[in-house]
Image (cartoon, rainbow, N blue to C red):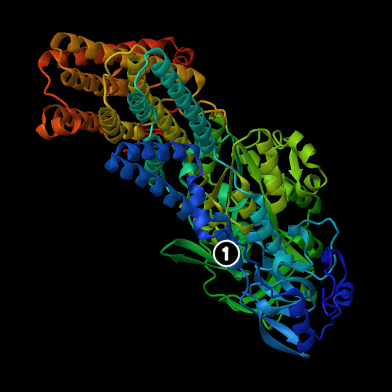
């Protein structure tokens, strides 16, 4: 490092301002331009570095590095060898489209970094050469002295050396909904980011007051730079579906290769088949066995799910995230703006005469104060309205706040009580000061009387008060009672503010802090960022579905516990809570040991959130992380599925997430999880349906070769059956509604194969049934007519109709399809069935198809035989389903969400 650049300071928040200035070789006059230029040369600009990106061609080609895509390319190569160029280009197009989709969605982390870079200030007011100058924020260096004013975006990490009523909105960094009061006093060395009152952090917003600070960190050496590093290093994981498809593809590849080698050996050494004929037959077997439509089926099924989720306000940025939601076992949620409205609301009002409850949520001035109050309540509401600098405005987007959240809550409760402040005039003000923790205003009423109105921290107002407002006027202040009231409200997680007043002479024109003595205490407000009502129901539904919900917030432990208890997230206030300081003292192994038992984490930092997510994943949990602030971005990237808020979420958070909620509603996560389960169910149904097509065809060819019989199918006829089932029937199951009780069963176990060993056995049995029926039809018709082409046409008809019958078995895999439910709920099935029948009739009777596929017109006996055997296949599969253990277990389940107006009703 250049000698002109001072060494970085570790934990400047714990040092005095003079110590920081001395270590950074600066003073109140700031740096000289020459010194600043030398430091800029040594340390680099105040910019977040961009990560090196792989070349575009590499990022594109990596999407072909998948076992199923290898199978797809293998099928294309085989068809190219066979000269079937139309099918070759169709399959290649599917592979390329799949890669393009992945390529377009590549780089979430890089975009998240760009979003964080956009949060940095464009310029700053810095003291250089003894005067204040506008300096590009990128040119700031450690040791620069910067001043802050209301509305400024802090341009770098600053150790404050001056603060006048300075409050900074750090919600994007810490998750706290209330601006942090700042001072110049050092704080403990182990203080968390949200408790470092002596610091101003890059990218945060000055809400009120003014300040000056010495730059201690720039670029990657700021808190926001640390978050960027965490985003880059957190790494995104493979989804459960990705792992399952990869595992399934590898197993399938091994099975196909093994069967092909066995068939070659039998044909060559047992039946002495000519090598050319054997190679042709083996290629036909491979074409029959490879489910070349599977990658496209998966992609299209997930794409359909994305469209259906978008109708429910969940926008999906990555296809496989849809399915991952369905396997979620734990949801880690931020509190502010996700579980709560991020709109402070007065819940309780306590006066010397009565206690009042306030209804209504957020900044919409709708609700009631009960019971009806008298002069005591009016006096409280007058202070709430007049001793206040906030404004509530109605816009096209709803009611919005201009000002601080706490003052907004007071303004709204005054509006609910009908207090407008008309006819009064503000004459003077003592602004809120973090040292005194109060605000006072002098007002003149319409009759000329004047009074000082005060609001602030209860302890500060109690020590300045002499009396309280009683039924017949002023009465002695009951401090013991008020201390009990304040403790009770604080224990409920409410932020407590107090109100007082002091009548003054009519000629009084100003107010000073020293005037605020012998006040008349009016009462206290209990204020809370209220839970979203729909989020309470959503948490209960998640618990019923076997999903744990954990709150990870930067807020204080008492507030977090109170909100969690009210929302039903924890049973009572005695549930374990882990704070950031406690978590910091733990090793990762110690955290792993307790992480499942703790549902509330308070005063956390971005690093803590990633550690929590990693500890849960170490137990095999599939973790969804929700959030809206930039502090959530690293954990969203690390989680199995990141969920960002679309309205209040930062751009960095949205880019790091897989799912964006358009309505910022936790309840939408519940809907999305349910959709994910439905989509996975339908994907599994589609795979279980598709595999017997390939299985039956390959078995038919295998049996013919092993026993040295006439081939019942030609390779081109195999392609025909694959094509019509893939085009018509396979996608029909993607539109299936959710089965009953989908949100009362526990999450599925992640990992393994998308088709379990039990289901694979089921698929093999169905393949044997359809293959046996096909062989029976072929050899029966062949024996009766002696016409090979006619018999092969009948065999193709049997395969197609057998698959159609099996489609109705697959509609309800967990219970019997011998129910009227199988006839309704999914109209796409019937259109698909009609399309298959029409295509099969064209194949059988159109002359040009006779030329292409060597087919023949079938007579009624052949059709009747195929239809009868298809009905037999349907009934036989139902018997197999009834014998499966899962069928008997599922039939005994009780279902909670069967009503059509509930969340799991079929999509229209």
Could you tell whether 155 is left or right of 159 in the image? left
Secondary structure category for the residue under label 1 = helix
| Residue 880 rendering spot, x and y as whole percentages | 39, 11
Residue 271 seen in the figure: yes
Q: Residue at x 38, y 36 (%)?
A: 75
How would you rate the neighbour count of disc 1 (Cα within 10 Å): few for under 14, some for 14-19, many for 20 or more?
Answer: some
In terms of depth relative to the viewer, which is nearer, 660 or 557?
Answer: 660
In the depicted structure, whether residue 866 falls above or below residue 68: above
Q: Quadrant of the N terminus?
A: bottom right
Could you tell whether 363 is left or right of 557 in the image? left
Q: Residue at x 54, y 40 (%)?
A: 239
| Residue 875 rendering spot, x and y as whole percentages | 30, 11
In terms of depth relative to the viewer, which is nearer, 593 or 662?
Answer: 593
Could you tell whether 794 is left or right of 564 in the image? left
Label 1 sits on residue: 114
Q: Quadrant of the C terminus?
A: top left
Could you tell whether 290 is left or right of 437 in the image? left
Q: Residue at x 45, y 55 (%)?
A: 104
Q: Where on the picture, by quarter, is residue 39?
A: bottom right
| Residue 434 rendering spot, x and y as whole percentages | 76, 68
């Amino acid at each position: 490092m250049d000698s002109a650049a001072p060494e970085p300071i570790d934990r400047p928040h714990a040092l005095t301002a003079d110590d920081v200035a001395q270590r950074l070789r600066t003073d109140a006059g700031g740096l000289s331009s020459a010194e600043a230029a030398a430091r800029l040369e040594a340390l680099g600009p105040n910019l977040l570095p961009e990560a090196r990106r792989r070349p575009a061609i590499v990022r594109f080609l990596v999407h072909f590095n998948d076992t199923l895509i290898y199978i797809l390319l293998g099928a294309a190569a085989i068809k190219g060898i066979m000269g079937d160029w139309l099918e070759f280009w169709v399959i290649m197009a599917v592979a390329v489209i799949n890669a393009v989709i992945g390529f377009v969605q590549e780089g979430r982390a890089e975009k998240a970094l760009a979003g964080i870079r956009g949060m940095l200030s464009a310029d700053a007011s810095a003291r250089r050469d003894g005067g204040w100058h506008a300096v590009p924020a990128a040119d700031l260096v450690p040791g620069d002295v910067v001043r802050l004013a209301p509305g400024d975006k802090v341009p770098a990490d600053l150790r404050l050396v001056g603060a006048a009523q300075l409050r900074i909105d750090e919600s994007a960094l810490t998750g706290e909904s209330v601006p942090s009061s700042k001072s110049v006093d050092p704080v403990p060395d182990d203080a968390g980011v949200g408790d470092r009152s002596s610091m101003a952090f890059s990218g945060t917003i000055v809400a009120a007051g003014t300040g000056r600070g010495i730059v201690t960190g720039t670029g990657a050496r700021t808190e926001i730079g640390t978050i960027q590093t965490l985003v880059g290093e957190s790494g995104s994981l493979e989804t459960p579906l990705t792992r399952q498809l990869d595992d399934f593809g590898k197993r399938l590849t091994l099975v196909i290769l093994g069967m092909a080698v066995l068939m070659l050996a039998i044909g060559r050494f047992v039946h002495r088949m000519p090598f050319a004929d054997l190679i042709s037959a083996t290629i036909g077997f491979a074409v029959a066995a490879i489910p070349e439509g599977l990658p496209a089926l998966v992609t299209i099924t997930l794409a359909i799910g994305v469209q259906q989720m978008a109708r429910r306000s969940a926008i999906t940025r990555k296809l496989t995230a849809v399915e991952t939601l369905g396997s979620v076992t734990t949801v880690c949620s931020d509190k502010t703006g996700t579980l709560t409205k991020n709109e402070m609301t007065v819940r309780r009002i306590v006066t010397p005469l009565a206690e009042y409850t306030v209804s209504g949520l957020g900044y919409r001035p709708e609700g009631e104060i009960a019971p009806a109050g008298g002069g005591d309540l009016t006096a409280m509401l007058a202070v709430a309205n007049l001793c206040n600098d906030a404004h509530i405005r109605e816009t096209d987007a709803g009611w919005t706040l201009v000002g601080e959240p706490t003052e907004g809550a007071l303004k709204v409760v005054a509006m609910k009580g009908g207090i407008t402040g008309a006819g009064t005039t503000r004459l003077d003000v003592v602004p809120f000061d973090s040292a005194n923790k109060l605000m006072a205003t002098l007002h003149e009423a319409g009759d000329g009387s004047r009074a000082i109105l005060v609001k602030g921290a209860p302890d500060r107002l109690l020590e300045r008060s002499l009396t309280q407002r009683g039924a017949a006027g002023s009465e002695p202040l009951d401090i013991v009672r008020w201390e009990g009231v304040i403790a009770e409200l604080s224990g409920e997680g409410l932020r407590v503010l107090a109100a007082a007043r002091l009548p003054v002479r009519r000629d009084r024109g100003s107010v000073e802090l020293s005037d605020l003595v012998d006040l008349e205490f009016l009462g206290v407000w209990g204020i809370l960022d209220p839970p979203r009502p729909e989020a309470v129901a959503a948490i209960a539904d998640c618990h019923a579905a076997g999903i744990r919900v954990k709150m990870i917030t930067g807020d204080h432990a008492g507030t977090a516990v109170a909100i969690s208890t009210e929302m039903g997230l924890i049973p009572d206030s005695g549930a374990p809570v882990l704070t950031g300081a406690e978590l910091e003292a733990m090793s990762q192994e110690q955290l792993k040991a307790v992480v499942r038992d703790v549902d509330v984490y308070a005063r956390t930092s971005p690093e803590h959130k990633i550690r929590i997510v990693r500890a849960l994943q170490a137990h095999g949990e599939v973790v969804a992380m929700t959030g809206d602030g930039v502090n959530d971005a690293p954990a969203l990237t690390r989680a199995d599925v990141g969920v960002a808020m679309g309205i209040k979420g930062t751009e960095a958070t949205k880019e790091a997430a897989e799912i964006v909620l358009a309505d910022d509603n936790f309840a939408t996560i519940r809907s999305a999880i349910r959709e994910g389960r439905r989509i996975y169910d339908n994907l599994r149904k589609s795979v279980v349906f598709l595999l017997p097509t390939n299985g039956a065809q390959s078995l038919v060819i295998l049996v013919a070769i092993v026993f040295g019989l006439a081939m019942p199918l030609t390779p081109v006829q195999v392609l025909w059956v694959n094509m019509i089932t893939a085009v018509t029937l396979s996608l029909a199951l993607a539109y299936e509604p959710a089965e009953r009780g989908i949100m009362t069963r526990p999450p599925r176990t992640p990992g393994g194969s998308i088709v379990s060993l039990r289901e694979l056995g089921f698929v093999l049995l169905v393949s044997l049934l359809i293959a046996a029926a096909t062989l029976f039809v072929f050899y029966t018709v062949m024996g009766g007519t002696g016409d090979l082409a006619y018999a092969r046409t009948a065999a193709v008809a049997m395969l197609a109709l057998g698959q159609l019958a099996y489609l109705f078995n697959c509609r309800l895999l967990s219970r019997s399809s011998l129910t009227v439910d199988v006839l309704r709920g999914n109209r796409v099935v019937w259109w698909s069935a009609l399309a298959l029948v029409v295509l099969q009739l064209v194949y059988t009777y159109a002359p040009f198809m006779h030329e292409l596929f060597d087919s023949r017109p079938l007579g009624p006996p052949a059709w009747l035989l195929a239809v009868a055997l298809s009905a037999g296949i349907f009934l036989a599969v139902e018997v197999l389903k009834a014998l499966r253990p899962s069928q008997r277990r599922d039939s005994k389940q009780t279902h909670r969400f069967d009503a059509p107006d509930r969340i799991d009703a079929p999509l229209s």
